[in-house]
Structure formats: C-alpha cells, structure tokens
Image: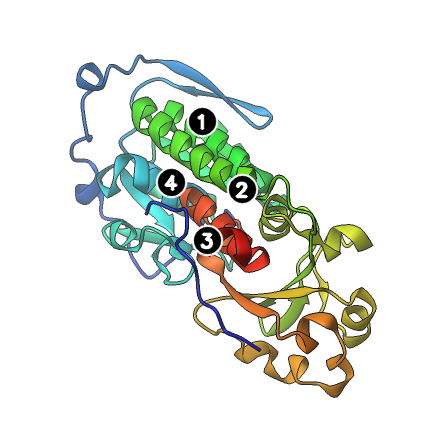
Amino acid sequence: MTQRFPLRLLATAALAAVALTGCAATTGAATGTTAASDAASGASWPRTVEVGERTVQVTAEPVRIAALSTEVGDLALELVGPERLVAVSEGSATPGTGNQLDLAEQVATHVSVTQNPDPEQILALEPDLVLLTGRHDDEASLIESLDSAGVPMAAFDSSAFGDPESVATSIEQLGELLGADPEAAELATSVRDEAKAVTDAVADVDERPSVLVLMSRGGQQLIRGAQTSTTNLVELAGGDSVASDHGWNQAVAADLELIVDANPDVILVQDFHGAGLDPFTELLENPALADVTAIADDHVELVDAATTSGTAGSRIGEGLAEIAGLLHPELFG
C-alpha cells in the first residue's frame, strides 16, 4: 500500500473539558497593547454578534482573549496575533494538531482539553472575551460563571468547523468579535476560493469512489462517522463516504467485518501526530481484509489530520485539495 503525504495542490499557504496546565498566567504579559486602536482599525464598539444560540455583546475591542479550544484559538491567533490572547488550548501548541504553532507558543497560558473546566481558573486570567467550541455538558458551570462575572463568551458548535463554508462563516464571526473584520473577510474569501477551485474541478466526475476513513485516538482504531469534517471533505472532493452510506453518525470501532462488508474503493488513514500508518498496520495486514478493494488495489492513503480534521481552520481548503488529489489524481496531476 502506498504512503502518500499531503499534497499542496490548491492551498496557499474546546473546550473539550478544560483545565489549566503547566503554564501559569502572567498578568503583565497580556495587559499590554492591542494590535491596533479602535480608531485605527475603524472598528465600532459596542457590537453584538450572533454565535450559535447566543447573542454575544462586546463593549470594546477585546485585549485579553481566552481561546479554550484549538479551533477558535488557531483562528484568533491568525486574525489578531498572540499579543491579545491570554490563553489558548494546548492543542494549538501541539504539532500535528495546531496550525499556528509559533504564535501559540508566544501565549503565556495553555489550557488542557483532558480535564473538567475550572471556572475560577479561567476567571483568574481576567479575560474580556472567552471563545470556545461547545462539546460537553459540564461547560454549563463555566458559562454560568462567565455570565455572572459579565465576561462575554462565544460558544461555537463543533459543526462550525466541519467544512470550508462553515469555517469561512466562523472566521467572519470571529472577525466581528475581535474587531478584525477586514482580516477576517480576506481570510474567509481565501478559504472559499480554495474550496471552490476543488469542487469545480470534481463537479463532473463520472465515478465517485467509496471511501472509508480510519483514525486513531486514545489507543483506539476507529472509523470516522458521517458529518464529520473528514467525511464532509471526502464528499466535497468527489467521493462517497462509507460512514454516510451505512448511517454511522458517530465513530465506530474499526471492526474487520464492518470493513469487509463496506468494501471501500479507498481507505484514508488520518496521520495523527505523525504516527502514519503504524496504528493500523496489524489491522490492514490482516488476511481477512486481503480482498477488500482498497487493499487489493493498493489504495490505502495517508491524509494529514492537521488539515482534514475539525481543527484544520483556514487550512481546510488545503485538506480538501489533498483528498481530492488522492481520489481523482487524473484531475490534479
């Protein structure tokens, strides 16, 4: 089986239960200056922004932003730089997950995504805006504490980062929240343009290969469910998602019988933190899978988790191009 690494065909370039780790907040590092004054940027304050089911009211340009998930943190860093952030998710500073590593390292505090949230620790950062990706029931106590303290909080749904259009919309919303409207408009346009170049190229394909996506998380080998970022990209790239066809709305165990029954034309393996195919070697070399079309035809491919998962951010067009190039190499060379 081949091991193709990410193509760069068309690209130009959570709070999942949070608690603070290691890096202590340093008040002095973040009380400083904004990237530009309100007058210089032309931003008008106060402003109201609709994010998900909440109306977020921001009275002035935020200068102490706590971004508690990788999705929002990477985009905030890209839009306004590290000077105005007092915290980002540790995922933003982790190779293979974050896409703004150098900028994330300049932020004093990194928050964990492996423990329950501690509202007091978040409030101790004295944020004037909190950004997160809502996923868990235990976020309610944090939201209540922030509301009681009068701290504006924007909770994005995880689906807000599931495809290029939703990412572009989220970028525009973040631009409004941060007072980075022009930068957000330019970045959102770039994401849409990159995606359109791919979807236009595959619009008239005669054959759409069936595609199964494997991922490894927490020592488990899983098949990605339908309506996740990677399966969405598969369908935009001119493929048919096995998960969608079988109604697997959540990740399921990478069971031999399921794979044999699905008989995909292509198997995509998400390269997570540089592990490559290693977590799946034993599975893919099992004799029971020898006649599966993707394996028999040597069509098991690596894709970069940093550009094809929900944390791809503005690089999601790059991930779409990568997948499209693997599914339809005749179109992309």
- Residue mark closest to the camera, 4 vs 2: 2
Which residue is under mark 4? 75
Mark 4 Cα shell of 10 Å, populated few (<14), some (14-19), many (≥20): many
Corner quadrant of residue 112: bottom left
Q: Residues within 10 Å of mark 3 (few under 14, many from 20)?
A: many
Which of marks 2 and 4 precedes in the sequence? 4
Identify the element where label 1 is drawn: helix
- Asked whether 17 or 265 is in front, the reply is 265
Residue type at mark 4: give it.
Answer: Leu
Residue 8 in view of the camera: yes
Name the residue carrying label 2.
201
Q: Amino acid at mark 2?
A: Ala
Residue placed at 49% from the left, 59% from the top? 305
Q: Is residue 333 left or right of residue 126?
A: right
Q: Are marks 3 and 1 in contact (CB under 8 Å)?
A: no
Measured Cα–Cα span from mark 4 to mark 3 = 13 Å
Pointer 4 or 1: first along the chain: 4
Taking the image as drawn, is residue 161 in sight? no
Q: Which residue is mark 1?
A: 173
